[in-house]
Image (tube, grey):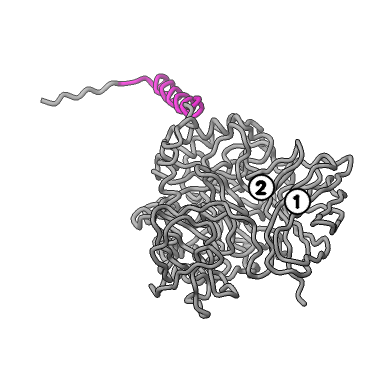
């Protein structure tokens, strides 16, 4: 027998219960989360496993800014498209009018996923909310979202459903910085007289957490939460740690990038030493110069042209070859490539984007084995980019060496055979100057990147080898291989450079083997922050010296190349190069030195 009871609750009691429920929800969002950063390396590796297997993802930057598409009131606005509110100094009262125009009737999430899948991408990151604060889903926390547009429907859930059905991981970008929220501090400088602004970062964090709960619990499980906009001083390390822990309390398996906290080192993107939160580094529009130790995860995000959000006048497209070679370069250093698309306001991808992704997919169909699930090259110095797996080495040939030989100096594994990965055609394996080598024909099988599959016993490994002049006559002297002479000098793995130049007797020294005597131009690759310029640097090889005065490169993370002069090396054999310098008294350091190159002078 079923018995039901009806309990009548007075109106004042219902109001009290409603307020109590709201208070409990707020408290749940604000309560300190447990510490999630103390997992073991094995636990972290297991959580990151799909990320390192994937290697290639699609970044989608889409929002209201796609409507003006780089123009405001008939004027072309310089800079990246999604920053038009900032660059054109548009008051919120005017910018919000775009909500009434946003109607992407040609949006087809299944087609977006098909394009990503055909390109060989394994995950999708989309801007759920960018710096302008507009949300691509129907959020209970604001009416400044897609539900208030003529389109009126959630854009994220259909994409998440389509991605998962296709086997892709769904991930969301979320901006910490918010140019429209009344509690966010600081108020945008171009809109400082906006009415209703009530700076209160605690209240804003509660808003963020409530929205992130909607995304994770309403559309999860997610692969990544990709934060951005953490650079303003009101966002602190303590808030970053708290937000990281909060997000992982909602989904412990989720991956969170390092922009949740304050540890990112500029556009180089890697995390500085310290107790900063975040699972991986985020280089932006650049690729690190070398790989990192095992257990350091990273992902380079990059545009196909010069903008993230759609701009109709930006036609500076990277070539297919450049994009494929960038993917290979990143994988050879143990990283992921997050390649951006900026859809139009109607919900379609520009045809230039579709064409490039289709071509990348054709290459990945034949060569993807050399990207997915691989780890970084075992070679410290090798002209060709390499990736590896247990029992296999993949050598990516951009240009055919003049000798017709791809040498693998220092490889300790027994080679069982070699062939072109795309065609299966066998290649000859031989010894050249006491190193294993592979002979390749004059005609390469792929116009972008040709991949050699080298089968070996075990995991490919190498022994250190001396610096030897390359086949093209150049000599590369990287900072990582230098001998440092000076108490303050140090090699920084994150920037791949030598810093700490304080005294005139500090020196950096290399030994190298020269095969061909001749004249050589001496070039240094360095960074020098504004205010540190004006130092003198010299490179000495035996009794020959070339010198130069250093100009600023703009920052300590922006590296330039500078030719210092020409020297003559008269015979083959072992030589030593030494770099010294004198910094200005007002400078913090002489420079950050990435390396020295000797380039043959054509006769």
Mark 1 or 2, nearer chain start: 2
Q: How packed is label 1: few (under 14 Cα within 10 Å), some, or many (20 or more)? A: many
Q: Residue at x 49, y 64 (%)?
A: 436
In the orientation shown, which residue stands out farthest toward the bottom? 443
Q: How many marks?
A: 2
- Residue 9 position, x and y percent, is 34, 20
Q: Taking 481 as reference, is 40 above or below it? A: above
Quadrant where the C terminus is found in the figure = bottom right
- The reply, left or right, for residue 289 in relation to residue 546 is left
Mark 1 touches mark 2? (CB < 8 Å): yes
Question: Where is mark 2, residue-wise?
Answer: 495
Residue at disc 2, secondary structure: loop
Q: Residue at x 45, y 32 (%)?
A: 39
Q: Quadrant of residue 113?
A: bottom left
Residue placed most toward the observer, 372 or 475: 475
Residue at disc 1, secondary structure: strand
In the orientation shown, which residue stands out farthest toward the right? 585
**Which mark, residue 472?**
none
The dominant secondary structure in magenta is helix
Q: Taking 18 as reference, is 132 above or below it? A: below
Q: Quadrant of residue 197?
A: top right
- Residue 470 position, x and y percent, is 64, 65
Q: Which residues are magenta?
A: 8-33
- The reply, left or right, for residue 149 in relation to residue 160 is right
Q: Residue at x 71, y 61 (%)?
A: 77
| Residue 108 makes an appearance in the image | no
Question: Where is mark 1, residue-wise?
Answer: 527
- Residue 457 position, x and y percent, is 39, 56
């Amino acid at each position: 027998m079923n018995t039901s009871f009806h309990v009548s609750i007075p109106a004042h009691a219902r109001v009290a219960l409603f307020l109590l429920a709201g208070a409990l929800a707020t408290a749940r969002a604000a309560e300190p989360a447990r510490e999630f950063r103390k997992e073991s390396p094995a636990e972290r590796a297991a959580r990151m496993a799909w990320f390192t297997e994937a290697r290639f993802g699609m970044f989608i930057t889409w929002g209201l800014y796609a409507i003006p598409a780089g123009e405001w009131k008939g004027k072309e606005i310089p800079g990246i498209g999604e920053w038009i509110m900032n660059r054109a100094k548009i008051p919120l009262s005017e910018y919000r009018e775009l909500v009434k125009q946003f109607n992407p009737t040609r949006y087809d999430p299944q087609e977006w996923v098909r394009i990503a899948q055909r390109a060989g991408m394994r995950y999708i990151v989309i801007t759920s909310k960018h710096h302008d604060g507009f949300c691509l889903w129907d959020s209970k926390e604001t009416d400044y979202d897609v539900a208030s547009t003529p389109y009126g429907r959630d854009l994220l859930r259909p994409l998440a459903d389509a991605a998962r059905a296709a086997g892709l991981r769904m991930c969301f970008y979320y901006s910490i910085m918010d140019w429209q929220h009344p509690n966010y501090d600081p108020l945008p400088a171009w809109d400082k007289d906006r009415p209703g602004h009530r700076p209160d970062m605690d209240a804003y964090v509660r808003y963020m957490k409530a929205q992130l709960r909607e995304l994770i619990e309403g559309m999860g499980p997610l692969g990544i939460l990709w934060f951005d906009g953490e650079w303003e001083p009101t966002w602190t390390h303590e808030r970053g740690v708290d937000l990281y822990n909060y997000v992982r309390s909602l989904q412990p398996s989720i991956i969170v990038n390092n922009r949740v906290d304050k540890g990112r080192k500029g556009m180089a993107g890697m995390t500085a030493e310290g107790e900063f939160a975040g699972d991986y580094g985020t280089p932006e529009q650049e690729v690190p110069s070398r790989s990192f130790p095992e257990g350091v995860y990273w992902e380079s995000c990059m545009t196909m042209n010069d903008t993230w959000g759609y701009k109709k006048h930006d036609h500076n497209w990277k070539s297919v070859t450049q994009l494929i070679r960038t993917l290979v370069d990143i994988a050879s250093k143990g990283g992921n490539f997050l390649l951006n698309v900026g859809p139009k306001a109607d919900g379609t991808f520009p045809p230039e984007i579709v064409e490039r992704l289709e071509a990348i997919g054709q290459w990945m169909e034949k060569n993807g084995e050399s990207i997915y699930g691989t780890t970084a090259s075992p070679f410290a110095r090798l002209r060709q980019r390499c990736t590896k797996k247990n029992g296999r080495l993949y050598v990516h040939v951009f240009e055919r060496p003049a000798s017709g030989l791809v040498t693998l100096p220092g490889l300790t594994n027994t080679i069982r055979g070699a062939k072109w990965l795309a065609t299966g055609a066998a290649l000859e394996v031989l010894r050249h100057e006491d190193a294993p080598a592979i002979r390749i024909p004059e005609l390469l099988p792929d116009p972008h990147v040709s991949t050699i599959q080298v089968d070996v016993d075990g995991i490919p490994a190498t022994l250190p080898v001396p610096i030897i002049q390359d086949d093209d006559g150049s000599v590369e002297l990287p900072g990582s291989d230098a001998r440092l002479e000076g108490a303050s000098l140090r090699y920084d793995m994150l920037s791949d450079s030598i810093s700490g130049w304080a005294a005139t007797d500090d020196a950096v020294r290399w030994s190298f083997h020269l095969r061909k005597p001749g004249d050589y131009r001496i070039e240094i690759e360095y960074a020098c922050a504004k205010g540190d310029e004006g130092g003198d640097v010299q490179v000495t090889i035996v009794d020959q010296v070339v010198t130069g005065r250093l100009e600023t490169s703009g920052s300590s993370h922006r590296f330039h190349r500078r030719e210092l002069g020409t020297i003559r090396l008269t015979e083959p054999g072992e030589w030593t190069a030494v770099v010294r310098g004198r910094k200005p008294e007002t400078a913090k350091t002489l420079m950050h030195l990435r390396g020295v190159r000797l380039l043959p002078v054509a006769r």
